[in-house]
Amino acid sequence: MKILVVFLLLLKVSQHALAVLVEVNEGERSVLLLCLYSGFIHEDPAVMWTREDLDPKSVHLRGEGGDDLRGQNQRYSGRTSMRSDALDSGDFSLTLRNPQLTDSGSYTCSISDGRQEQRLRDIQLQVKEPFPSWVKALLVLPFLLLVSGGLLFHFRHCFMSVYKVEVDSGVESVQLPCKTIVHLLKDAKVEWKDRDSRKVHVYQSSSDQPGEQDDFYRDRTKVKRNLQKIGDLSLTLKHPTGRDTNTYTCTAYNKRGNILMKKEVLLTVRVPQVEVESGVEYVQLPLKTTLHLPEDVKVEWMDRNHRKVHVYQNDSDEPEEQDDFYRGWTKMNEDLLRTGDLSLTLKYPREGDTNTYICTVYSREGNILLRKQVELKVRVPQVEVESGEASVQLPCRTTENLPEDVKVEWMDSYIFYKYNRKVHVYQNGSDEPEEQDQAYRDRTMMNEDLLKTGDLSLTLKYPTDGDNCTYTCTVYNREGNILMRKQVELKVKVCQVEVEEGAESVQLPFKTTENLPQATKVVCWHNSYRTVYIYQHGADQPDEQDRFYRDRTKMNKDNKDLLKTGDLSLTLKQPTERDSGEYRCGVWIHGYIIRYKTVLLKVKGRAQVQDQTGIIRNRSSSIDPTPLMADQSDL
């Protein structure tokens, strides 16, 4: 470790302290701040290392019982240590590991007996950016000093490099370093921007310019005073979160607007991730702090959609401020301000709970004391099945002993509706088909004796791609409280049919449950919004059919008992390459779609068709399936 220690004898030396400047390069393993004491040590002594410019100011505290780091500033967490026999040996020196640019500052070593505090030593620590070795060589050669100075100024843009800074979400602040050897006049302008060209901080005419700052960064940034004089244009960003991960550019301009210096800093804010399987009883989003929190603080958890997840204030939860989506699903620890454990517990996490959560602690005046992010990912098991299978099982099993009066409810998350549909309901020892949505009627089944075996799996008959969504199984007790909840994602592959051009016919298969209601209307759509076939009132409706398909289609063998058999397969005669595309068959009742299926037809041509320009035309096409979901209120 290479550490340059320069002792500066002050004009006025305190009786107890000698001011020392310690310089170290960023990236060194550690730096030692010396503090030796040979005086009398009273009872109940405590050695304190502090920085007056921080809040909290404690860097390290050691008493007779060992280290006491409860009040330690978070930026030093896990990076400081003192000798185990410090109070016996009088060696109060502090070891600071992995020194960072933000560690630069004035450190004070003191000893206290609980009544009086004695200041022993002040140390000025300066953590410097490593200087390129080739520049050192130029500076060492006396006869090249003048030449190198001119070259450095002339080619100052060549020294641009992206400096990388990484920090954990939850720290009080982070410094984006930017130092220059270019002499800046008082009329220079220093501007920090992010990669989206938002103004992060502007300094001009010896003062900040908050009016030019983007709202996202307002009240969160600061730069050093007299920065032109010291050449340190570094930016301090308070309470960084994952949203602050960005590339920041520091640019210095002269009075005429010419660029004097430009430097980029890549900031990465590490956000802890929590991953959990759907079906667990709860998940905890961790947040612990050593800060002393007053009783009048406000603790607020929010998601990235700015919905309030949980609010704690005045020693109690505030459910009326909570978003409806999270109401009844969250809780925080008791006595959280005393313990510093601000973790959030989210009950029965769902796929929709996959989100980024932000915990912010506010003072009574509304100032931010702490902010931290946590990413939650809820894994949902996926079941995949080929189109045309007779049935598929959505697994849900539990080892809990379920009472006989529980209610088991399967729901879907159908994307074309604003509400979830009831897929299957089991209660009082039997199924409850009257509560079931008509889209699933006669299509679902659960195991017998399911409460005894704990197998709550659902069997869905004749699955199609129209059934693709996430299904949720929830178990309620008699009072309506949730005992268990688990999700399963179903993916049914799209049916594909391939035929040679010139074949007599091709069938687009669609088999569903028998005995469909007589009010049913069956519609097939082609990929250019043309109606292929309509069946209603027990007969074809050729007048509604596109003439391109007239006399070329039929359903079933003789269209008899079509709804009774549930065989809605479409036969297309004399297919050509122009018929290639996506077909959808929908089953409607009273304007409500209860079944649909997609079939991808590919008719392989005998030869490609070449026009006079020599371009080979591809007649295949695809569509947006939206027409099938159009309003059918007239049915």
Image (spheres, helix red, strand yellow):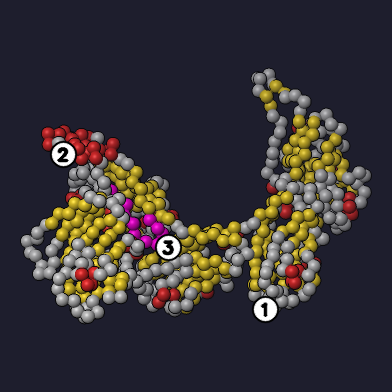
Residue found at x 15% / y 71%: 38
Return the x and y of residue 336 as percentages of the image width and height.
44, 75
* Residue 194 visible somewhere in the drawing: no
Quadrant in which the C terminus is drawn: bottom right
Disc 2 marks which residue? 140
Q: Position of residue 452 (x, y in %)?
A: 75, 72
| Picture coordinates of residue 147, whole percent (x, y) | 16, 33
Q: Earlier in the sequence, mark 2 or mark 3?
A: 2
- Could you classify mark 3 by the number of other residues whose Cα lies within 10 Å: few (under 14), some (14-19), or many (20 or more)? many
Q: Which residue is mark 1?
A: 479
- Residue under the point 84% across and 45% down: 569
Residue situated in front as seen by the camera: 590 or 12: 12
Farthest residue in the left direction?
11
Give the spatial CA distance, label 2 vs label 3. 46 Å
- Relative placement, left or right, of 384 versus 540 is left
Assess disc 1: are there few (<14), some (14-19) or many (≥20) residues with their C-alpha within 10 Å of its C-alpha: few
- Please identify, in this view, whether the residue under mark 2 or under mark 3 is nearer the observer: 2
> Is 110 one of the magenta-colored residues?
no
Q: What's under tag 3, amino acid-wise?
A: Lys
Kindly identify which residue carries mark 3.
372
Quadrant hosting residue 616: top right
Which label lies toward us, 1 or 2?
2
Residue occupying image coordinates x 25% and y 70%: 85
The correct choice, above or below, for 437 with respect to 576 in the image is below
Q: Amino acid at mark 2?
A: Val
Circle nearer the N terminus (1, 2): 2
The residues colored magenta run 167-178
Q: What whole-number distance in Å separates the C-alpha atoms at marks 1 and 3? A: 37 Å
In the rendered image, the vertical position of residue 9 relative to residue 607, given as above or below: below
Q: Please tell me in which quadrant of the rendered image residue 68 appears.
A: bottom left
